[in-house]
Structures are given as C-alpha cells and as structure tokens.
C-alpha cells in the first residue's frame, strides 16, 4: 500500500504541538525530499513517529530542538530524527527480525519495540548514532508512481480506480480495527486501576492525549471516560450477580471509595448496588 510520509509526519507533529510547547521543545522539520510517497506493508508510520516523539520528550529539556529531516535518493526515502538530548535507548535492527518469530504484544509501542514496527511496516532502521548527538534514521522504498510522467500514465492515474480505492479503504479500516482492539485490550487490563485515565491510556499507546481523545471519539462514538465507566459498571454487575460484596466490587472495578462507587452505580442503573444484589437474590428465590 502507498503512504505519504510527509502527511503522516505533519499530522503527528500537529497532535503533539501542545505538549511540545508546554515542555519548551522546538521541532524543526526539514524536507529535502522531492518525493515522499512510499510503499509500506502495514500502516505503522503514525505509531513509529508517535513512539519517537514520546521518547524525545523524556530525553530533551526546555530549549532543546528536535530536528527531523526527510530526504530521498533514486529508490529510498529516509527520515532522520536528530537531537542533543539524553542518549537514545539501546535498540537495533536485529531485534526486529528476532521478534518476528515470537508473539509480539500489540500494545507494546516502547522504544525497544520500535525496530519491530519499522520492520513490520516494510522499512529499515539504520544503526543508531549516539556520538555527541542522537541520530535515528529509517528508510522506506519510494513508490515508482511518483516518477511516472507519460501522458498515458497520467490519464490512467486520473481515472478512478475502484480496486485501488477499495484496497485503500480496507487497509484504513483494518488499521482502525487494530487500534480499537488495542484500546479495548488496554481497558480490560487496567479498568481495575483507580488511577487509570485518558492521559495514561494515551501515554501507554505513545500518542498525545488530544489525538487519542479525537480518534477514540471518532471510532467509538463516545468519550474515553464514558467508555471506561461503561466497562467498570458492566463488570460490577457481573461481580454483584456472582454474590461478591459491594466493597470488594468497588475496589475491583477501580473505585477507592465504596460509598462513591454506590453513588455512581445508582446514577448509572437507577438503584444502589446493595439493592441490585438483593433483587437478584429475590428473583432467584421466586
């Protein structure tokens, strides 16, 4: 499939702009590339760029600059991230191929998993440089369509290609479905944590909170807070129906205070959890 690297990069930087400004970190985007449409095996570029930016914000301090350079040769587009912050994590291209033979945690977007995601997208990671300045460079194969110039080919590209459009739509749909699965798995694993929040969910997925909220609302049709509440309340119902005590249910569903849990439960279902449990017992007796 085809992907515009410059477009993905600009979208990613826009999503992080508020956080970058608050940390006092400047991003300099330099485009030397005459072409930026590349061939990718999977739509992982936003994951890759988000992961690198999230890591950079941990390593850089106020006043420092992250320089991003796009350049191309006859067949490859390179994207180079360069800064003078703390040293980059220790990872290499070899770890990507090693992880191909094992089950990869789809929620793992940490720096150590970056080589895998680059390799999985069809790209390559060049050796990381840490001599005075940090430099991480990745490359993808350029699409040959950018160099087609004959009039016949131009006319052909101007015509609607239903097959290509359908393929692009399906690829985009698969990407969003994968992201939705990642979010639901994350919520299933952490809904019992009272400190789990929108900010922590976004951080776990190496995406800005603003970008996470926007994408979540678009795909789920609700806010993340509302969705998390739904999950906690449905789980609370299951536990109450199994005879669990109200206090135990509260703590297991991410509430520090059983009284507050009872208030939220009543607001959500129209009756307190103690009454809900007793009604189930009465119905069973009948």
Image (tube, rainbow, N blue to C red):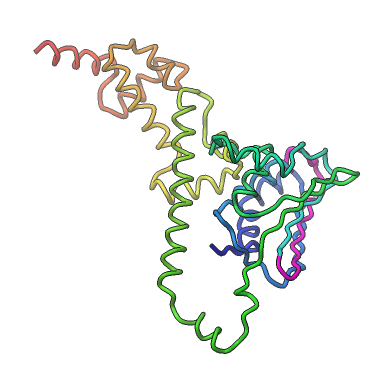
- Identify the residue shown where x is 31% and y is 29%: 268
User: Within the magenta stretch, is there residue 89?
Assistant: no
On the image, the x and y values in percent for residue 241 come to 26, 17
User: Vertical placement of 150 versus 173: above or below?
Assistant: below
Query: Among all residues in the image, which is located at the extreme left?
Result: 286
User: Vertical placement of 124 versus 96: above or below?
Assistant: below
Query: Among all residues in the image, which is located at the extreme bottom?
Result: 151
Q: Is residue 141 left or right of residue 244?
A: right
Q: Tell me the quadrant of the picture where the C terminus can be found.
A: top left
- Identify the residue shown where x is 71% and y is 67%: 75
Instruction: State the extent of the magenta-drawn residues as a range.
Output: 56-75
Q: Is residue 42 left or right of residue 16?
A: left
- Identify the residue shown where x is 46% and y is 81%: 159
- Identify the residue shown where x is 44% and y is 52%: 174
Query: Among all residues in the image, which is located at the extreme right?
Result: 132
On the image, the x and y values in percent for residue 62 come to 80, 43
- Which corner quadrant of the image does residue 70 belong to? bottom right
On the image, the x and y values in percent for residue 230 come to 36, 33
State the residue in front, 153 or 25.
153
User: Vertical placement of 170 versus 35: above or below?
Assistant: above
Total marks shown come to 0
On the image, the x and y values in percent for residue 260 come to 41, 20
User: Within the magenta stretch, is there residue 64?
Assistant: yes
Q: Is residue 119 left or right of residue 169?
A: right
């Amino acid at each position: 499939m085809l992907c515009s690297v410059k477009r993905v990069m600009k979208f990613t930087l826009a999503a992080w702009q508020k956080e970058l400004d608050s940390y006092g970190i400047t991003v300099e985007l330099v485009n030397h590339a005459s072409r930026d449409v590349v061939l990718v095996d999977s739509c992982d570029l936003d994951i890759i760029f988000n992961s690198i930016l999230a890591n950079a914000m941990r390593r850089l301090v106020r006043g420092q600059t992250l320089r991003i350079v796009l350049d191309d040769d006859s067949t490859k587009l390179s994207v180079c991230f360069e800064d003078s912050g703390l040293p980059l994590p220790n990872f290499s291209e070899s770890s990507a191929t090693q992880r191909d033979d094992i089950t990869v945690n789809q929620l793992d977007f940490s720096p150590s998993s970056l080589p895998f995601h680059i390799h999985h997208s069809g790209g390559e990671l060049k050796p990381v440089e840490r001599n005075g300045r940090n430099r991480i460079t990745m490359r993808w194969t350029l699409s040959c369509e950018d160099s087609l110039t004959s009039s016949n080919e131009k006319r052909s590209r101007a015509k609607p290609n239903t097959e290509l459009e359908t393929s692009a739509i399906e690829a985009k749909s698969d990407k969003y479905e994968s992201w939705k699965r990642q979010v639901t798995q994350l919520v299933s694993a952490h809904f019992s944590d009272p400190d789990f929040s929108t900010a922590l969910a976004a951080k776990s997925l190496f995406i800005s909170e603003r970008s996470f909220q926007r994408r979540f609302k678009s795909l789920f049709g609700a806010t993340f807070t509302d969705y998390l509440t739904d999950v906690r309340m449905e789980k609370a119902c299951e536990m109450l129906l199994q005879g669990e005590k109200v206090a135990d249910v509260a703590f297991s569903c991410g509430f520090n205070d059983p009284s507050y849990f009872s208030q939220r439960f009543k607001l959500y279902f129209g009756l307190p959890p103690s009454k809900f449990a007793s009604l189930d017992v009465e119905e069973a007796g009948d």
